[in-house]
Amino acid sequence: MSLARSRIATFERPSLLQRIAPMLDFDGPLLVAVLLLAGAGLVTMYSAGYDHGTRFVDHARNMLLAGGVMFVVAQLPPQQLQRLAVPLYVLGVSLLVAVAVFGVTKKGATRWLHVGVVDIQPSEMLKIATPLMLAWWFQRREGQLRAPDFAVAFVLLALPVGLVVKQPDLGTAILVLSAGLYVMFFAGLSWRLIVPVVAVGAAGIVALVIYGGDACQPGVKWPGLHDYQKHRVCTLLDPTTDPLGKGFHIIQGMIAIGSGGTTGKGFMNGTQTHLEFIPERTTDFIFAAFSEEFGLIGCIGLLLGFTFLIFRGLMISAEAPTLFSRLLGGAITLGFFTYAMVNMGMVSGILPVVGVPLPFISYGGTAMVTLGLGLGILMSISRSRRLMQS
């Protein structure tokens, strides 16, 4: 009898492949988009960074690390992610406070915290922790949302954004702020509150374009902005006023993009890139290097890749089974849009220069891991939907 039971147990025991298969149940279209963009990033980094130390090897390593993070997070159900919202948010804000008190200062900015043998940048954590926290808050208030609930959400958002702005790190602050605002928008923020803010912003841009010459004079102070941030905006209006200084990045980026033409100069043939006219060619301005070598056709292909990624992420979010998943998935997906829009806009001379990388293309370990974390959350949401349907 015991022998028969042993045979039955052996027969019913799932194989190693059967046990692993559920762990590899990723969203196919989303995975294809990620792999295509990652491939474009590796090709671009090899060209732009082959003579830049170990940038290509490090970029590939960062991608593998981000893939590991995505794999691990994808195994967590959204319910588990929801339980992590408050601890991650509290930890992130606490680390930002620690940075403000005894952080490490580099190039005039206090953004890092020395932990053991490495310096970490806690603000990166808030790109995920903030929308996670806000999605948790609105899930708790589902069915009974009122104006005070949005006021509380705004306070939860303003706290990390204010701490990041103080560092100062305007690029990361924009990403954290936009992620939180996306959650509030999807939660049902009234258009009566959105339209006036957009109108004031549009009016401010028009006034800046018209009266920028007077506002950019040396003695004029801009409330709420540091001098270097004012200079970035003024340089955007007319980069030729300081072609070898503040305007150098914008001018060289636009030259590289324009010189690529329709088909580009070809892989490894970018003169602006390899003669080192493009500053930060492997990080913030890598889109200029990509445009020079692959031209308009390559840029259209890259835009289509990001567009497909964003639409697929929004589809996953719209079909999510819970409010928490819908809000979090939508915010993370539009976060990818913000990354790409701000980076391409600043390199093209449409937006001021801020430290925002181009997803999957720019070099940067912390940013890449953050992207992997966001993709893992989308994979988790997609898997939870399929499990409920099966």
Image (cartoon, rainbow, N blue to C red):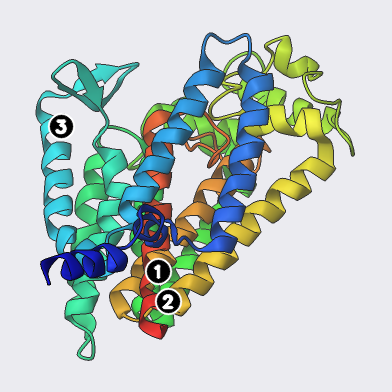
Against 251, residue 184 (above or below) is below
Q: Specify the label residue 383 is tagged with.
A: 1
Residue 193 picture location, percent across and down: 38, 76
Q: Residue at x 23, y 85 (%)?
A: 142
Identify residue type, mark 3: Ala
Badge 2: residue crowd in 10 Å (few <14, some 14–19, many ≥20):
some
Badge 3: residue crowd in 10 Å (few <14, some 14–19, many ≥20):
some
Q: Nearer the viewer, residue 46 or 150?
A: 46
Distance in Å between CA atoms under marks 2 and 1: 5 Å
Identify residue type, mark 2: Arg
Q: Specify the label residue 386 is tagged with.
A: 2
Q: Nearer the viewer, residue 362 or 93?
A: 362
Callout 3–callout 1 Cβ contact below 8 Å = no
Q: Is residue 133 visible?
A: yes
Residue 163 picture location, percent across and down: 21, 42
Badge 3 or badge 1: first in the primary sequence: 3
- Splitting the image into 4 quarters, where does residue 44 fall? top right
- Splitting the image into 4 quarters, where does residue 21 fall? bottom left
Q: In what element is the residue under mark 3?
A: helix
Look at the image and tell me in which quarter the N terminus lies: bottom left
Q: In what element is the residue under mark 1?
A: helix
Viewer-side label of 3, 1? 1
Distance in Å between CA atoms under marks 3 and 1: 39 Å
Badge 1: residue crowd in 10 Å (few <14, some 14–19, many ≥20):
many
Q: Residue at x 45, y 27 (%)?
A: 61
As drawn, is 90 to the left or to the right of 189? left
Against 4, residue 379 (above or below) is above
The residue that mark 3 highlights is 100
As drawn, is 12 to the left or to the right of 237? left
As drawn, is 219 to the left or to the right of 249? left
Residue 248 picture location, percent across and down: 64, 20
Callout 2–callout 1 Cβ contact below 8 Å = yes
